[in-house]
Amino acid sequence: MILPKQYRCTHSPSCQCTSGHLSEDVLLLVFQHLNWNPKLVATLSCVCKWFDDFAKRVLWKEFCKTRAPKMMLDLQSSGSHCIDGNWRALGKLLIYCSGCTQGGLFNSTVQIPGHFVYRTRFSRTLGRSLLPPQCRTDVLYVCDPCEHLDQGEEGDVGLFRGIFKSFPTSKVRKVIINKAVPFHPSEVCPYCKAKLWSMLQAKIIPQSACIRLEAYEDCIEYFVCLNGHLLGICTLAPLSDSEDANPIEDNNHTEKKQENCCVKENILKRRNSLLGGSENGPSPQKRLTNSNQCNIDV
């Protein structure tokens, strides 16, 4: 005899949901009509443990597949039916910039609160430029830096995030383990709460990263967690002005350039204590097009 599946709350005996729930099929149709609204999915997850489990298993998965279909197909093309970590963590990574705290993961002197990003673009080409030459066969999707301008001594800050495909079998993970890079002593991934490795401490941040991110050389740092989520920070370099700018604009540009040089020196004095990096000028700026990218709208 086949018993019908019971939809009951497993949160606690005192929960008001003990009378049962709607079937998963009905909830699936409701959220499909709502276009998998992430704020409503997050609200539903707070109702009780059953709703939270359903959201993690089904709703966040459908949200990711709807917002980034090509990217999800590629991430699952290795034969695995489950993204590294979980679907809720990946959904949050797609639409949420985690910001940074003073003295936190990036040892920053400014406080940048986390916020939703209503339109973003994840690029496999950008991710490849953040990998060392010996690991270029790994697949990494990275979003364009989220710009936070005029952050005092930090200058123009860019925050970016990404995800590896099949991170447990990636070459980056093998390199980090072979170098015996320790985990960060206190901070964890803001998306899945897993422990973090520093790519800067592993000395595998290539020079192509600063060119592709349009950032100052030696002012880039990023971490990767056990589930393959990447989060990083960089100091954005200003784009050059046009040749036909007037003298007033030229003077302003000169003052801004001197100010940016001072900002870069202050940043390098703090961050080069880890590796003793060189204090070079801003790297050459070059805009590259993404040949393999994914646009995401919330």
Image (cartoon, helix red, strand yellow):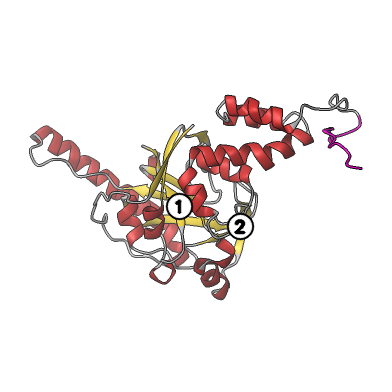
Q: Quadrant of residue 132?
A: bottom left
**Observer able to see residue 163:** no
User: What residue lies at 44% left-to-right and 47% top-to-bottom?
Assistant: 160
Q: Position of residue 103 (x, y in %)?
A: 54, 48
**Observer able to see residue 237:** yes
Mark 2 to mark 1 CA distance (whole Å): 17 Å
Which residues lie in the magenta part?
Answer: 1-13
Residue where numbered disc 1 is placed: 141
Specify the amino acid type for callout 2. Answer: Ser
- At label 2, counting other C-alpha atoms closer than 10 Å, the crowd grade (few under 14, some 14-19, many 20 or more) is few
Q: Is residue 295 left or right of residue 49?
A: left
User: What residue lies at 88% left-to-right and 27% top-to-bottom?
Assistant: 18
The residue lying toward the viewer, choosing from 256 and 218, is: 218
Disc 2 vs disc 1: which is toward the camera?
2
Q: Is residue 205 left or right of residue 22?
A: left
Q: Quadrant of residue 211?
A: bottom left
- At label 1, counting other C-alpha atoms closer than 10 Å, the crowd grade (few under 14, some 14-19, many 20 or more) is many
Q: Position of residue 235 (x, y in %)?
A: 37, 48
Q: How many marks?
A: 2
Q: Say above or below: 208 vs 3.
A: below
The numbered mark at residue 80 is: 2
Q: Is residue 213 magenta?
A: no
Q: Say above or below: 145 vs 131.
A: above
The kind of secondary structure the magenta stretch mainly shows is loop
User: What residue lies at 54% left-to-right and 41% top-to-bottom?
Assistant: 65
Q: In which quadrant is the N terminus drawn?
A: top right
Q: Position of residue 91 (x, y in %)?
A: 57, 41
